[in-house]
Amino acid sequence: MGELLTDIATYGFSTLIITALLCGLCPVLVLRLLLLLYPEGHERRAEWLLEISHVPYRERLIWVASLIPTAFFEAIPERARRRVVSPPLPPPGEEVSLENALAEPDHMVDGYVRVVYDKSAKKFVPASAVGHDFHWPDKTLPTGWLDKGTTRDMWPDDSEN
Amino acid sequence: MKVTHALVQLAAALVAEPSQKKWGYDLSKKSGVRSGAMYPRLKQMLEKGWLTDGWETDVEGRPARRYYQVTDDGLRELGALLARAELDARFQGLNLGMA
């Protein structure tokens, strides 16, 4: 306690607060800001945030500082890639057009159909019809299992894409 | 994949105990590779199929972590990489644990 008071007297209270922020709270705060660069749902968001809780406090500043360039080089291209490959979702309330899909029994699995939003046709079409290499769950494209009559409002949360 | 000091050190840490799951911070400490250099290489190794990854389950009292584990292919490739690094003058100063 005596040392703390001496430090406050020597360096000033504001210096002590700034130091405490930098060494304590700031790395996690900086990391959280850094992780915002990644698109939502990206695995790094969870991975780094959880991993830092296992990094000793005194090493966190260096740990996070080292991740800054990595985040820029990974997250920004990833965002750009997703913007290019991920077509816009149809407007809310628009009924998903699945006539073609439903006309093809081959596309159906237990009454549902795997679909992908066809940007040029502006409607959902069977994933197999556009040759989309379908991976489920696919985080890069608005794809899913849809039933006839599905509307945009019933679409899975956008944040997942 | 470009063979760098970071990659060689990471490979040495990964093959040291190949059956064990590895976590980011521990791997960084064991390999001596900075976090910023480590994660991109882990990602490359995952893409090549040298590693598998997953999330811890059944953890109590602490947050779950993402782990990495060397695959059979990875063990072979990383072993070969280390063998080449042993002969490379650039990596003479490194302790690759392949005495």
Image: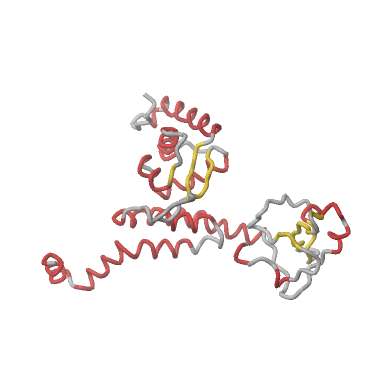
User: Which corner quadrant of the image does residue B31 belong to?
Assistant: top left
Asked whether, in this view, residue A67 is left or right of residue A12, the answer is right
Question: Is residue A151 positioned above or below A27 on the image?
Answer: below
State which quarter of the image contains the N terminus of chain A. bottom left
User: Which corner quadrant of the image does residue A100 belong to?
Assistant: bottom right
State which quarter of the image contains the C terminus of chain A. bottom right
Q: x, y (%) of residue A60?
A: 34, 56
Asked whether, in this view, residue A130 is left or right of residue A29, the answer is right
Q: x, y (%) of residue A94?
A: 76, 73
Q: x, y (%) of residue A3?
A: 12, 64
Question: Is residue B9 positioned above or below B37 on the image?
Answer: above
* Residue at 40%, 63% in the rendered image: A30
In this view of the protein, which residue sits in the foreground, B71 or A120?
B71
* Residue at 44%, 42% in the rendered image: B22
User: Which corner quadrant of the image does residue A129 belong to?
Assistant: bottom right
Asked whether, in this view, residue B67 is left or right of residue A81, the answer is left
Q: x, y (%) of residue A34?
A: 45, 62
